[in-house]
Structure formats: C-alpha cells, structure tokens
C-alpha cells in the first residue's frame, strides 16, 4: 500500500510563519524563472533550503500528531535540514572547482552528506509515502551490499566518503542532482500556477462546463465526472487531489440517479487518474520525461494529447455502455447549467492559452508558467465569481508549498535511487534480465514493462515509479527501432494507471472513502472502466503517428487516430458486454479478435478487420432499431 499522507493542521503564529516562508519561496522561484536561474548548485540548494524544512513542519511523523502543533523533534529536524543546503550555497565557488573522484571529501562534507540522505528518507516517509521511503532505503543499502553479490548484481565497494560525494556534492545525480533541478527550475512555478488557478474559481467553472456538456445525456453524472476530473487534473497533476476535489460532487450525484456506490467510486477514480495525462500541466513526470529523453516539454505535450483524448473517450464509452446496461438517466433538470454561465466563465481558459502560446513560441516552461500566473491574477481580479481576498491568497500559497514540498521530496528521493542504480550498474543488469525474459519479442517486452511499472506504482507515487522503470528498462529496448519518447510515454502512461490498478489503487481507495464503500471492492471494479485505456499505450507503440512526430503527415495522424478511436470504443463495449444491446460472449470474442487485428498495422489485414468492425457496428445498430420499431408497433 502506498500509505496515507497526513497533513498537520497548523494554526496561530506558526501558520503565519509558514505562509510567509512559503511566500518567500514563491517569490524566489518566480524571480529566477523570469530573470534567470542561479548557478545549478545554488539554485537547487536554495530550493531545498525552502522546502525540506516544511516536510517536518507540515507533515507529522505519525497520524496521531496531525492535530497537534509541531513538536521539538520536528523543529530540530527542520533546522537541521537547513544546514546542508546552507553549506552548499556558502561554499558554491569552492565546490564548483573540485574534481569528482579526485578532490578529497572532507570529514565535514561526509557528515553533511550522510545527514542530508537521512533527512530525505524521513521527509519522504512523511510527505510522500512509507513505501517510497523503504524503496529509497533499500537502494541505499544496496550500494554497500552489492560488492558481496556475484554475477550481474555485483559492483565495486563504495566508501562512506564516496557515498557522501555522490549523494551530496555532485550536481548530476544524488539529492541535488538533475531531478531536483527539474523541481526547482520548472515544477515549482507550475505548482504555483495550479494553486492560483484552482483558488481563482476555475474548479467550479470546470464542473459547470461539464454539466453543460454532458448533464443532459444518459449517465450524465458519470460523464460529468470524466470531463470535470480531466480538466481539473490537467492543472493539479494529482489523481488523489482530483478525486477529492471533483468526487465530493460527482459521486453523490451518480448514486442519486441510480449508480451503485461501488461503481460510482470506480468511475470517479478512473476519471481522476487520467488528469496527469492531459496537457498543458500534466504531472511532474512529464517534465522529468523531457529531461530524460533530451527533448523539449512542448514535444512531450504534443505527444501526450491524442493518447490522453483516447483514454478519456475510452472512459466515457465505458460509462455510456454501463449506463445503458443499468438504464441510468441524466442529471436532474434543476441542476442544468445554461449557456450564459458557460460563456461568462470562458476567460478562465485565458491562462491556459497564455501558457500554451509562450511554450510554443520558444519560451522556457518556467517563464511560460510565470506569464500564465500573471494572466490568472488578472482574470481572478476581473471575474466576479470568486473574489480575490487575503484569505484566498493565503490558501493558494499554502496549497502551493504543500504540493511543492511533496514533489521536492519525491524527486530528491528518486535522485538517491537513480544514483544507486548508476553507481552499482543495477539498471543495466535488470535491463539485461528483462531483455532475456522477453525472448527478443517486443510484445512480451512491453507486457513485462507494463507489469513492472504497475507493481512499482502500487508502492510508490507516479513520478518515482516512472523514473525507476525508465532507468531500468530503457536499455532493454535498445535493440528495437522505437523512438525513445515512445517508450517513456508508455512507461509514464502505466505509472498513472497504477493509481487505479488492484490490489492497490490510491485513486480507487480515495474514491471509496467518499462513496463509503469497501476500498478493495472499489479497486477491483475500477479496471472495468479503465480497460479501454489500457490498450492505448500498445496502440501508440504500434502506430507512432498518435504521438504526432514531425515525420508523419496530418492525414496519417488523423487516420491512425480514427482507427484507434474505433478500437477503444469497441473495446469498452466488449468489456461492458453492451453496445446497442447486450453482447453475448461469442460476439465479444469475435469483436476482440477484430480489434486486435485492426490495431496491428499489417498491410491489408488491419483494413479488412476495420471494415468488418464497422459492418458489425452498423448491423447491430440496424437490428436494434428494427427491434425497437417492432416493439413500438406491437404496443
């Protein structure tokens, strides 16, 4: 189990200090994102100087302390976490001139290196999850015990001085490595953007817009959950935050019109899980992906769009067929939203448009986010729906620093893991093992990769699960002619789907708490609504046109998208057992075979299969309509 994160309820003077500290952190990051980042070591050290102490103040060491003020030990850890970063800032010039493996590591540096690693482990336990901190500890110990192994997993002995140097003094790996660099240079300002957007009233507007679009149709509340969760999640980048934000409205509404509580929770979980797939913000892993693949964030956005759309079409199709099966109706008339409300709120999209414009105009992601934040403030002031107040600003600041602290700890912990994999050569060893068990089959290798990331995702958050899997399996794909970005997108996609995959699905468990249903039963029901989305990563590996690479024409991209669209919708129908009416097992098997042959791009075979699929759909529609006419005449 990923473990529940407990947020301390702080009040009084400490709350004021935390808010002011958070405001200073925001000002620093906005300044460096707009004017220009500092030297990497100083920038990253300052980033953790602001955020690491908050892990011990905002997140209690145990659940029973969440209603209590920080204890003496919390303050001690918070102060201790300042020292390693301050040392790096003060001695930056001297440290920049040292030579790795050559310049001697002093006793003080070694002590500080060990201290920062211990603090990161504890911060990860509090702010990320117990499971993730255990994974970090495992990889730390592996560095020291690997020399005693034999074969692929054996590596040379590492001294404590070398360990401290690797984890503390280097800028390409470890706590202050490139992953922390992504957190400070890009992610922080995007989290600030999300915080101010969500507090400006955009969340309510997304719900109104979703009701306007889908509320009048069969299974309306469930479709509202899909649309609103996607829009909300594209900003928050968190499936859990998304589930609580939108599920508190959609789950009771689904239950009200006839959805069983377990299915209502499952639908909300699946809808929220896909939010990090949607541009422009996506999750933290998207920014890491740009760094790991050596590409720009705009290319990652471009590659993610169609697969995200297909995921949500698959979810909505599953919801629709389930609504047909359960004979569920639309949203009550008194809850409908009129066109005027939708039009008044359209300015909420201006910050989105601002960000996308600057991103695709060649500006850095950080600076694009700064301009989007400015646009958000302007819209917040102009629109009357949710007035800007000192209280709302305070709430936005605290929302931002909580999210930024979690991400900073997760990436610092992931930096420790990646350093361990690099130092010991374990990534190559694991890659070789995976490759050998794939028997040179791309399909088997993809399935093994999917299983690995789903297992990892059951224990740790999306971003670390993606980073570890990508580090380990990247080598295994070197013999196949597949673009690096395609492999990373495949891993990223399943790292997200791990949040709704049994036996552990953090989004499913969160939705179950709102629906007041057994968590495991909700998690078991969730894949039914996500299954159509599970085939999308395999489709874009086979049909790379879906990732909109420059070498493909518009016509090729549109053709692949439409073929994939049909396959995803039919897959949703197969899983639910309904199309226009109930589908018996033989028809479902035939449809499954046709979908498989359509996805596999083998010259005429895919086109013939697609033709039979379309003929089947048309015939089912005709038979259903004829039966309705016969019934109406007999009545």
Image: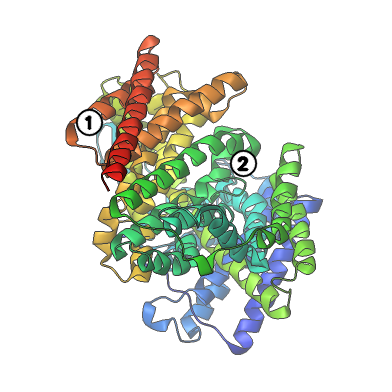
Which residue position is annotated with label 1? 587
Which residue is the extreme one toward the bottom? 12
Residue at the extreme top: 604
- Secondary structure type for disc 1: helix
Viewer-proximal residue among 472 and 626? 626
Badge 1, how many Cα within 10 Å: few under 14, some, many 20+? some
* Image-based side of 324 in relation to 92, left or right: left
Residue at label 2? 99
Question: Which residue lies at the image location 34% right of the left edge and 36% below the top edge?
Answer: 625
> For this rendering, which residue is in front, 414 or 233?
233
Provide residue 272's location: percent of width, then percent of height.
Answer: 45, 55
Q: N-terminal of the two: label 2 or label 1?
A: 2
- Residue 173 in view, yes or no: no
Crowd class of label 2 (few under 14; some 14 to 19; many from 20; radius 10 Å): few
Residue 567 picture location, percent across and down: 38, 30
Distance from Cα at disc 2 to Cα at disc 1 = 67 Å
Q: Please, what secondary structure does the residue beneath circle 2 have?
A: loop
- The image shows a total of numbered marks equal to 2
């Amino acid at each position: 189990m990923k473990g529940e994160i407990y947020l301390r309820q702080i009040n009084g003077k400490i709350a004021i200090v935390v808010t002011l500290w958070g405001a200073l952190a925001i000002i620093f990051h906005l300044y460096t994102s707009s004017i220009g980042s500092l030297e990497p070591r100083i920038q990253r050290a300052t980033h953790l100087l602001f955020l690491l102490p908050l892990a011990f103040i905002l997140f209690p060491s145990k659940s029973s302390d969440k209603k209590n003020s920080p204890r003496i030990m919390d303050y001690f850890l918070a102060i201790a976490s300042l020292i390693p970063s301050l040392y790096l800032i003060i001695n930056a010039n001297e440290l920049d001139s040292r030579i790795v493996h050559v310049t001697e590591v002093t006793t003080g540096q070694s002590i500080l290196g060990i201290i920062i690693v211990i603090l990161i482990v504890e911060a990860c336990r509090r702010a990320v999850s117990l499971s993730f901190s255990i994974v970090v500890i495992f990889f730390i110990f592996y560095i020291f015990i690997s020399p005693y192994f034999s074969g692929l997993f054996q590596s040379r002995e590492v001294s404590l001085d070398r360990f401290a140097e690797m984890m503390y003094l280097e800028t390409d790996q470890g706590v202050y490595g490139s992953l922390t660099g992504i957190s400070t240079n890009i992610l922080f300002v995007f989290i600030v953007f999300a915080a101010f957007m969500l507090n400006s009233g955009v969340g309510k507007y997304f719900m109104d817009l979703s009701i306007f679009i889908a509320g009048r149709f069969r299974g309306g509340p469930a479709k509202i959950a899909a649309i609103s969760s996607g829009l909300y999640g594209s900003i928050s980048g968190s499936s859990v935050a998304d589930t609580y934000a939108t599920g508190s409205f959609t789950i009771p509404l689904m239950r009200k019109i006839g959805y069983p509580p377990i299915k209502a929770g499952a639908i909300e979980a699946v809808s929220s899980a896909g939010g990090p797939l949607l541009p422009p913000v996506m999750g933290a892993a998207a920014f890491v992906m740009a760094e790991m693949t050596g590409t720009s964030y705009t290319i990652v956005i471009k590659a993610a769009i169609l697969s995200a759309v297909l995921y949500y079409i698959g979810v909505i199709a599953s919801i629709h067929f389930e609504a047909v099966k359960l004979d569920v109706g639309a949203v009550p008339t008194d809850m409908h939203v009129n066109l005027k409300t939708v039009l008044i709120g359209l300015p909420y999209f201006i910050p989105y448009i601002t960000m996308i414009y600057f991103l695709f105009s060649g500006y850095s992601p950080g600076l694009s986010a700064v301009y989007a934040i400015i646009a958000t403030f302007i819209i917040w002031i102009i629109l009357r729906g949710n007035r800007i107040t000192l209280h709302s600003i305070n709430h936005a600041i605290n929302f931002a620093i909580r999210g930024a602290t979690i991400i900073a700890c997760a990436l610092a912990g992931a930096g420790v893991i990646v350093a361990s994999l690099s130092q010991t050569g374990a990534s190559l060893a694991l890659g070789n093992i995976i490759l050998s068990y794939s028997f040179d089959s791309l399909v088997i290798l993809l399935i093994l990769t999917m299983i690995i990331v789903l297992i990892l995702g059951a224990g740790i958050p999306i971003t670390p699960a993606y980073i570890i899997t990508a580090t380990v399996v990247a080598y295994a794909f070197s013999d196949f002619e597949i673009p690096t970005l395609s492999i990373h997108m495949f891993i990223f996609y399943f790292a997200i789907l791990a949040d709704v995959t049994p036996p552990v699905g953090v989004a499913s468990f969160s939705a179950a708490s709102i629906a007041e249903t057994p968590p495991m039963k909700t998690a078991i029901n969730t894949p039914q609504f996500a299954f159509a989305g599970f085939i999308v990563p395999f489709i874009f590996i086979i049909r790379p046109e879906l990732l909109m690479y420059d070498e493909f024409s518009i016509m090729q991209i549109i053709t692949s998208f439409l073929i994939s669209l049909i396959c995803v919708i039919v897959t949703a129908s197969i899983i639910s057992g309904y199309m226009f009416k109930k589908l018996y097992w033989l028809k479902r098997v035939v449809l499954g075979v046709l979908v498989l042959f359509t996805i596999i791009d083998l010259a005429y075979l895919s086109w013939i299969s697609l033709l039979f699929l379309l003929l089947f759909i048309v015939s089912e529609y005709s038979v259903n309509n004829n039966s309705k006419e016969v019934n109406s005449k007999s009545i």
